[in-house]
Image: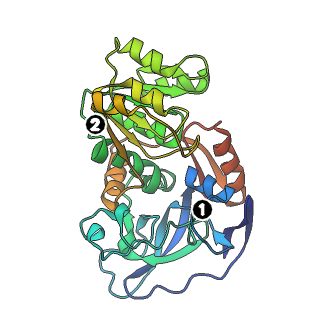
Amino acid sequence: MQALQLFGDRDLRLGEVDPPAAPGPGEIQIRVRAVGLNFIDVWGFRGMAFAKRKMPLTVGAEASGEIVCVGEGVTDLREGDRVVMYGAQTCGRCKACREGRDNLCEDVSGVMGFHIDGFARERVTMQARLVVKVPDGVSFTDAACAPIAFGTVQHMLFDNAKLEPGESILVHAGGSGIGTAAIKMAKAIGCTVFTTVGDDRKGEMAKALGADHVINYRNERFEGEVRRLTKRKGVDVVFEHVGPDTWNGSLLCLKRGGRLVTCGSTSGVSTTMNLMQLFQQQYRITGSFGCSMANIRQSLAKMADGITPVVDTVLPLGDFSQGLERLESRKVFGKILVAID
């Protein structure tokens, strides 16, 4: 079968690999139909794996597909079911896993497509406990955005930031995959949404999604605009994933007792901050990584209710690297996906 494999830094090759083994007890085999691209794919493409990994490595951390074969003992899934796959090989045994906090697994084997073979291939065999059924009416391409993009946003906004209806939120990089999802999820519960973008075209598109205030950070200091628009009060929540370039400005945008939740650091990994400001203003800062299986189910339910992903581009498997380059260039608005026929 065909698979897309990483042989070294920025060296992706589409080639033939052996098909997966038939599913054993508790396993299923899935025909992969769509793969979502994320910045974790860009980091892996650049060689930023943060851990040892064996090359060549099949890429792709987020995907949807349909079950083609079911192993012994699997009773809640059957051939033909449409599913999405959890992108981390969790142990299923530790306290965190047993409590449904899958992204805090104490013995995770790695992230698929990053540390261990991922989903950018025609078929994959995996444990049935690591898949979630896709509701009727949700397409394969939309569903492929649930395990990382939508799931991450669901976890950030509602598990960690505790976003409430009617609150105000600043969403950074409103044209990104998670940024567009955050705008739509926040507007769906009646929040006032501020967002930053890198050009006016993206600004108009963000407004069309429901953003109330759009700030082009290339023309204006976003922290000054947020404070002006809120009459110096600030916002309840900042949705942060840029890193050092926006970190201290983001803190200035928070009202007293405000919450900042962060899941990324695309502009670098280190920053400095004013600790007196932190404790005097009683900020609450939360790191957020990935999501739980429950968050994926919640995300798929929202898609079924009409909160669908914004899709920038759908590419064939052979153009995966072009999708990564587009994502890296920040010219994207929404999600880039790969369809596997």
In which quarter of the view is residue 57 placed?
Answer: bottom right
Outermost residue, front side:
276
Percent of width and height locating residue 22: 51, 86
Q: Does residue 140 sit above or below 118 in this rendering?
A: above
CB-based contact (under 8 Å), mark 1 and mark 2: no
Dot in front, 1 or 2: 1
Mark 1–mark 2 distance (CA, rounded to whole Å): 32 Å
For image coordinates 42% across by 53% down, the residue present is: 289
- Can the viewer see residue 192 in this picture? yes
Q: Which mark is residue 49?
A: 1
Quick check: can you spot residue 209? no
Element under disc 2: loop
Q: Which mark is residue 163?
A: 2
Q: Is residue 76 left or right of residue 53?
A: left
| Label 1 Cα crowd, 10 Å radius (few <14 / some 14-19 / many 20+) | some
Q: Position of residue 7 (x, y in %)?
A: 73, 69
Residue 26's x, y, as percent?
37, 83
